[in-house]
Image (tube, grey):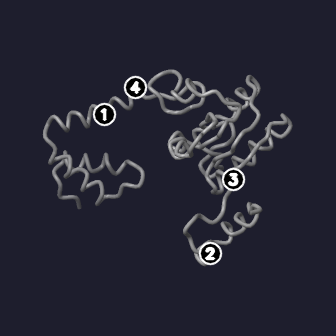
Amino acid sequence: MDKNCEPIARLIGCFMSLPGVGYKTAQRYAYSVLKLDKTDCSNFAKAIVDVKDKVKFCKICGNFTENDVCDICKNRQSDIICVVKEPKDIIALEKVKNTKWVYHVLQGCISPLEGKGPDDIRIKELLDRINNGNVKEVILATNPDVEGEATAIYISRLLKPLGIKTTRLAQGISMGSDLEYADEVTLTKAIESRTEI
């Protein structure tokens, strides 16, 4: 039984509603909030409300933005679209030097177990972008899990009749890892994605 007073217990419950936050972590966060002065608490609460009030999805690619169109779509012209599952994936891919593509965020992946089919994610919007522009290549950068693979295969089959070059991120052994710890699927992908040196 939780022996915290009601406001603390409620705050712990709020933190626990976040993905990956268990009771102990939520409790630590709640106690940290108690140590903040009132101004810092107000700023913290305002930041949460501002995120809900001001952040929306880019009407072109689906990335997070405060405006109708995100900075990437506004400032970058490209005939290559990189398809990702979520806006946070863009942050990871933007670390690549000399990025020359624009993005399309699906807002999820095909997942029958979660009741998500092709009509529940932004595939139609991707096809509209391709049909309305001069897209030469689509990079499928969904996660290398069951849902990501299913989504990539589904999209690639839709694009094949359109004559659009469709590529998938290479998969396999990461730098600095040992072969003995790699699973069968990872090793298979590494062998299939091998390149000449």
User: Residue 111: where, in percent of width, then height?
Assistant: 64, 49
Label 1 sits on residue: 47
- Kindly identify the amino acid type of the residue bearing the numbered disc 2: Leu
Say if 155 sits above or below 178 in the image: above
The span from disc 2 to disc 1 (Cα, nearest Å) is 44 Å
Q: CA distance from mark 3 to mark 4?
A: 33 Å
Q: Residue at x 51, y 29 (%)?
A: 57
Q: Are marks 2 and 1 in contact (CB under 8 Å)?
A: no
Q: Secondary structure at mark 4?
A: helix
Question: Disc 2 and disc 4: Cα gap in Å?
Answer: 46 Å
In the displayed structure image, the side of residue 17 where residue 57 appears, left or right? right
**Spatial separation of the CA atoms under disc 1 and disc 4:** 10 Å
Residue 26 coordinates in the image, percent (x, y): 29, 54
Left or right: residue 73 versus residue 161 is: left
Q: Which residue is mark 2?
A: 179
Q: Residues within 10 Å of mark 4 (few under 14, many from 20)?
A: few
Type of amino acid under label 4: Lys
Q: Quick one: label 3 or label 4, which is nearer the N terminus?
A: 4
Dot 2, crowdedness within 10 Å: few (<14), some or many (≥20)?
few
Task: Please identify the quarter of the rendering in which residue 116 is found.
Answer: top right
- Going from N to C along the chain, the mark reached first, 2 or 3, is 3
Left or right placement of residue 78 versus residue 24 in this view: right
Could you say which quadrant of the image residue 174 lies in?
bottom right
Rendered image quadrant of residue 3: bottom left
Between discs 2 and 4, the one toward the N terminus: 4
Q: Nearer the viewer, residue 115 or 127?
A: 127
Residue of label 3: 149
Which numbered disc covers residue 54? 4
Callout 3 amino acid: Glu
Per the image, label 1 sits on a secondary structure element best described as helix
Going from the N terminus, do you reach mark 3 or mark 1 first? 1
